[in-house]
Image (cartoon, helix red, strand yellow):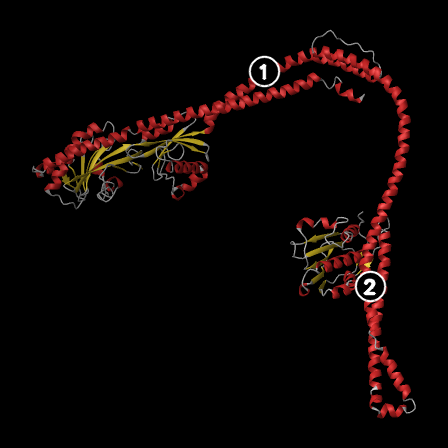
Amino acid sequence: MSSFRFLRPSASLAHATLIKMGVCIAAIIALATFIGYFQLIRSLRVEALTNLERYARERAHREQAIFVLAEDNHAALKKVLEERIRAYRQQEPAHRFGHLVTRMPDGTVRHSPEHFDGTRMPGIFISGGVRLDDELRSRTLAVYDVLAGNGPLLHTRFTNTYITLPEKLIVIYWPENPSWSHDAAPDSPLTSLELFTNSLPENNPRRQTAWSGIFTDTVIKSWMVSVSTPLDMDGQHVATLSHDVLLRELMARTLNDYLPGAYNIIFRDDGLLIAHPELMKEDASSEYNILTAGEQPGAQAVEAHLASERARLRGIFEQVKHRQAGQSVLEDEENDMYLAVARLKGPEWNFVTVLPRSVVARPAFHAARYVLVLGVVALLLALTIMYWVLKLQVSGPLRTLTQASERVTTGDFEVGLDTSRNDELGRLSRAFQRMASEVQQREVALRQANEGLEQRVEERTRELRDMHGRLVDAARQAGMAEIATNVLHNVGNVLNSVRTSATLAKERLAGLRLEQVGKVAAMLEEHQADLPTFLTQDERGRCVSPFLRRLGMHLQDDRREITMLLDEVGKYTDHIGTIVKLQQGYARAPLVHEPVSLAELLQDALRINATALERHEVQVELELARLPPVVTDKHKVLMILVNLISNARYALDAAPPEERRLRVRLEGPTGDRVRIQVSDSGVGIESGLLTRIFQYGFTTRQEGHGFGLHSSATAAQMLGGSLVAHSDGPGCGATFTLELPFLQNGPPAQHR
C-alpha cells in the first residue's frame, strides 16, 4: 500500500510539473537575457568606442585651431620682419628712434609717453646698460613697424603680440595692459624667461616654433601659454616673435563640453596638467604635474582630498604614454574605463576623453532588466494558464486513478474509471482496470501456491541445516590442518636446533679421552707395591699427577659444555611444548599477556638459532635500545622472532661467508609503538613479492612450506601490531619490521 502514497493529492502532479516547467522557462529567460545583455553591451561598446574616437579627434581638431593659427601667424610675421629689418639697415634710424623713445632715470629706455597710446600702438622697453648702436636702432624700428601694422589685426584672436631681441629689448602690443612698457621693472628678466629661452640656438637647434608651459598672468588673472618663433639672419639670432594664448576658453570647453557620462583632460608629455575637472581648473592657484604631484606645494591637501582621482590620473598618463603608435582608443582595465587620445598640433598636448565602462554598460543593463521583467510577467501568465489546464485535464483524472489504486491495495478490485477518453489518461484507465482484474486472478492463484510453498520451505530448511553442519565440520578440519601445519613448521625450526645441540653433545662425549684414565689406572696397579717410589722416582710416575690434574680440568670443561648443550636441548624441548600449546589456542584461546623484556626475548631468539648461525658463519650485529618491560604475549613474539631470524639465515646461504651479516635492532618507542627490525644481506626480494610472501602457502625456497611468515604476520595482528617487509630488489638483502603496541599497563586490543 505504501507504494501508492506518493500519488496523494497533497503531492500534486500539476504542482510539480508547474515547478519544473517554471524552472526551465525561467532558466531559458535568464539565459536569453544574459546572452542578449552581452550581445547588446558588445554592440554598444563598439558604437561607444567609435563615437568616443570620433569625438576626441574632432575636439582636438577644433581646439588646436588657435595654436595652428599662432604658428601660421609667426611664419608670416617672420618673413615680414626679416624683409623689414633688411630694408631698415639702409636708412638712418637715429632721428626717428629718438622721437619714439626716451631714457628714464632708472637707466632703461622706454617709449616716449608724450604721444604713446598703448591701446593702439606697441610699446618699447630696453633694459638699462644696453648699448644702442645704429644696427640695434634699425632692428628696433623694424620690429616696431611690423607690430604696429599687424598687432591690431592679430589682437582679434590673441591677447598680445610681442617681439624680443637678444639685447634685452622687447616691443609689445597688448591693449589690455597698455602701460606695460612703462610699468615694467628695470630688472625685468626679458631674456631669461622660458618664452625667450625656448628660441635660443642651444635649446632649439632646429629653429622651430616652441611652446612654453602654462602660467597665470598677473594682469588678467588667467591661464595662458606662450608661443615663440626664433628669427635668424646671417647665422645670428636677431629676434624672437611671441604670442600669449589665453587658455580660458580652451579650459572651459574642455571641462564643460563633454560626452554624456564622460569627461575631458589635457596634459603635456612631461606630465604637466593643462585641464582637469578637479585638479586643474581655470581658478587653480598653481600648476599640477602628474609625475611630481607629491612634491608640489599644497600636494598634501590635494592628496588628502582627491587621492583616488590623483592615482587614477597617474594611471591614465601611463596608459597614454605607453600606447602603441597610431592607437587612439585605450582600455584601462585597472580603472575600469575607456580612453580616447588625440594630439593638439602646436604645443603637442594630449587631449584625452575618459569614458567609464559603467556608462557603456548602463543602457544594456536597463534593456536587459526590461527584458527580464517582461519575461517574468510572461512566465507568471503562462504558469497560471498551464496550472488551470493541468488541474482540469490531468490532476482530476489522476486523483480518481489514485483513489482507485488505493481501493485495489485494500483488496477491492471492483473499480469504475472513465475509459471513454482517447488520450493517454483514457488508455491508462483501461489498462488499470485490466490490471485490477489480472491482479485479482493472480491473488487467488498466489494464495493457492503459497500453501504448497510453505511445505517446500520447511523441506529446504532441513536440507540447509544438514549442509550447514557438514560445512562446520569441514571448516573445523581445515582449521585443525592449518594449526597442525603451523605447529609442524615452528617445531621443525626448534628441532633443528635440538638436533644440532644433541649432535654437538654426542661429539663432545665421543671426544672424551677416558681410555687414558684406564691406562693410568693399569700403570698404578702394576706398581702398587712400590707406588711411592714409582710416583716420585720413575719418570713415567712423575707424569701421572700432572696428567691427572690436566685430565680433570678437561673433564670439567667437557662436562660444562655437555651440560650447557643438554640445557639448550631442554629449553628447545620446552619451547616445542609452548609452540604446541600456542598453536592449539589460535582459534579461540585468549592471549596470555605479561611484562616482557624485548631485549632478552631477542637474545633468546638468537640463542635458539645460535647453532645454525654459527654453522653458516653468519655475523650478527645486535643493537638494543633500553626499554622497560612491555606487556605482550611472550611466546608469540618469540615465535615471530625465531621465524624471522631463521628465514634471514636461509636468505644468507647464497652469499659468500665473509658477506653474511645479520642485523637485529630494537628501537626506542615512537608514540605508542615499539619497533624490532631483522635485516640481512642475502638474496633480497622482488618488489612484486613484498606482500605475497605473507600469504598462506607462498614460499620462494624449494624446501619451504609458506607457513612461517603467514603465521608470524597473523600473530603480529593478534598482538595489535604489524609485520612488513622491505627490499631494494634481488641481491640487496631484506628488512622485516615488527611493530608492537608499547603497553606497560594492560594487553593490546586483539585483532582476529
User: Which percent across, then down, holds residue 60?
Assistant: 33, 29
Query: Which residue, given by chain and number where applicable, does mark 2 sit on?
Result: 499
Give the residue number, with chain letter if any, for mark 1: 378
Residue nearest the observer in this picture, 421 or 239 = 421
The residue tagged with tag 2: helix, strand or loop?
helix
Taking the image as shown, residue 84 lies to the left or right of residue 682, namely left
Q: Reading the chain from its start, which is encountered first: label 2 or label 1?
A: 1
Using the image, determine if residue 660 lies above or below residue 314.
below
| The one of 319 and 281 positioned closer to us in this rendering | 319
Quarter of the picture holding the N terminus: top right
Label 1 sits on a secondary structure element that is helix
- Quarter occupied by residue 50: top left
Amino acid beneath label 1: Ala
Residue 495 appears in the figure: yes
Task: Farthest residue to the top: give it.
Answer: 420
| Residue 652 coordinates in the image, percent (x, y) | 70, 60
**Is the Cβ of the residue at disc 2 closer than 8 Å to that at disc 1?**
no
Q: Residue at x 68, y 13 (%)?
A: 390
Q: Is residue 114 visible?
A: no
Q: Residue at x 89, y 39 (%)?
A: 469
Q: Amino acid at mark 2?
A: Arg
Q: Which dot marks residue 40?
A: none
- Residue at horizontal 84 percent and vertical 46 percent from the top: 478
Instruction: Pick out the residue farthest to the right.
Output: 529
Q: Nearer the viewer, residue 400 or 156?
A: 400
Residue 275 found in image quarter: top left
